[in-house]
Image (tube, coloured by chain):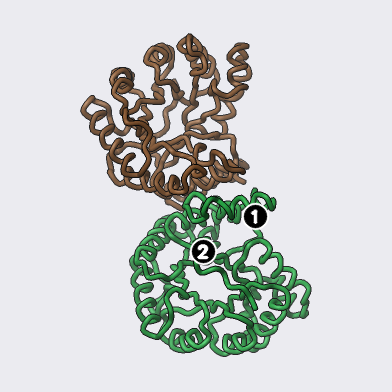
Chain colours: A brown, B green
Amino acid sequence: LPDNSDPASMKMIIIGELINSTRKAIKKAIDEQDVAYIQDLALKQEEAGADYIDVNAGAYVHDEAKHLVWLVEKVQEVVSKPLALDSPDPKALEAALKVHKGIPMINSISAEKERYKQLVPLVRESGAQVVALCMSDEGMPETADDRLEVAKRLLSDLDADGINLTNVFLDPLIKPVSVNGEYGPQALDAIDRIAALGSGAHITSGLSNISFGLPHRALLNQAFIVLAMGRGMDSAIVDPLDKKKMSLVKAAEVILNLDSYAMNYLKASRAGKLI
Amino acid sequence: LPDNSDPASMKMIIIGELINSTRKAIKKAIDEQDVAYIQDLALKQEEAGADYIDVNAGAYVHDEAKHLVWLVEKVQEVVSKPLALDSPDPKALEAALKVHKGIPMINSISAEKERYKQLVPLVRESGAQVVALCMSDEGMPETADDRLEVAKRLLSDLDADGINLTNVFLDPLIKPVSVNGEYGPQALDAIDRIAALGSGAHITSGLSNISFGLPHRALLNQAFIVLAMGRGMDSAIVDPLDKKKMSLVKAAEVILNLDSYAMNYLKASRAGKLI
């Protein structure tokens, strides 16, 4: 059985994002049923420290379920970490949940009425961890206030629907600072205020949106993950093969006193994983 | 005349720390009056983005003033940025202030009665910027509360003594996380609360203490400077030749909306300064 991450740990929960069919090389590998390519990428992400391996077959509009099931089966042949089943489609998720061994993450539910209603039974019955996007039928959030309001509604609804809030990963939805300079501070402020709710829910996000439209995107993503950790984000959906980013995460864990006696940091140092 | 950094800018104010006589190579260069070595290091720091070049002759117990004056003169022959005159000794500072062209920084005053009393006239008369250590006769601060209390006293005393608080750089004094895991959170909390005072004073610190006793110190220092910026620190006393750290500072400025339209970031990118 997959070993889910230790619930008592305060370390960042890393969701490896690379097996995503919207990426060209992945689409090609799925098209060609290139098992070795997919399994190698899954293993590399696990080795780099991913706690969940995200799998996405969303590029297959007409047979997403079939391809998602294939990804789950092939990835679980080689990794012991649980997967994040990345789809808004209840049929694809239902099929993937049937074959996934152990307790996965569902990525993702939102406060959009139809999506919420369709997915919440799957979340409850599977006991899965679940990413909950701070997005409602009114659209993408703009300010920290918007995000906080949707976050509160999600927490209240999920709790009422029998979901243990410690299984919930709220995603405040990060927007590019190249579009509006205030999007960085607004996102960090949202993280701060969601963390201050003390609901027991995690906070995660796909970070790379922050750097869209600017050069040296990896650099901006590295700075953002550290800033977000400083405000209370405890999970991220990222490329775990960026060794510098993962090193900075481990360093930030030490400084934020999330890594007792720097044990995890020292272990990573000895293993040659820090740069 | 040296061009002091733009007071309207919200960018981090970087104090280049490398010309310090407690470093072996610097002591040797001063002993040998190796002008080329000192000037090269000054130029490199300016080129890397230092807003102030720190000069320290503290290793010369009996003739600190003479060596500090020599450093000021030699460094100002080649750089246009002002210097940070790094001494607690009023005689050394007085001599250095006499030869420094333009308005320097004095590094540093503290809330220790004798030191404060001796240095505050020099600060007032020179119109210098001044680093003010959150340290009193009761010793080094331990908690965020300790730091806040000393910071408030310094702000109140400096204001009463006619110092413009926008010239003040409060230093919360960073202690190694290897000694106590809570020192990281306490330092960040102190920065947060000092910034929230809204006094107009800057917040700076020698960062590298944070990583004392741990491997990969540069990595920890990089994570810490980003975390501290996220809590309101707007200056740092650092090695500006660490290109990755300076890159992360520029990236964090973009995310924190301290760099309008990412103009400074894009300029650094075009100049090949980002990694």
| B179, above or below A10, in the image | below
Secondary structure beneath dot 2 equals loop
| A124, above or below B31, in the image | above
Q: Residues within 10 Å of mark 1 (few under 14, many from 20)?
A: some
Q: Is residue A129 left or right of residue A161?
A: right
Q: CA distance from mark 1 to mark 2?
A: 21 Å
Q: How many marks?
A: 2
Q: Report the amino acid beneath label 2.
A: Ser
* Along the line of sight, the residue nearer the viewer: B233 or A125: B233
The quarter of the displayed image where residue A6 is located: top left
Q: Report the amino acid beneath label 1.
A: Lys
Secondary structure beneath dot 1 equals helix
Residue at x 54% of width, y 38% of height: A212
Q: Position of residue A5 (x, y in %)?
A: 42, 32
| A209, above or below A84, in the image | below
* Along the line of sight, the residue nearer the viewer: B139 or B170: B170
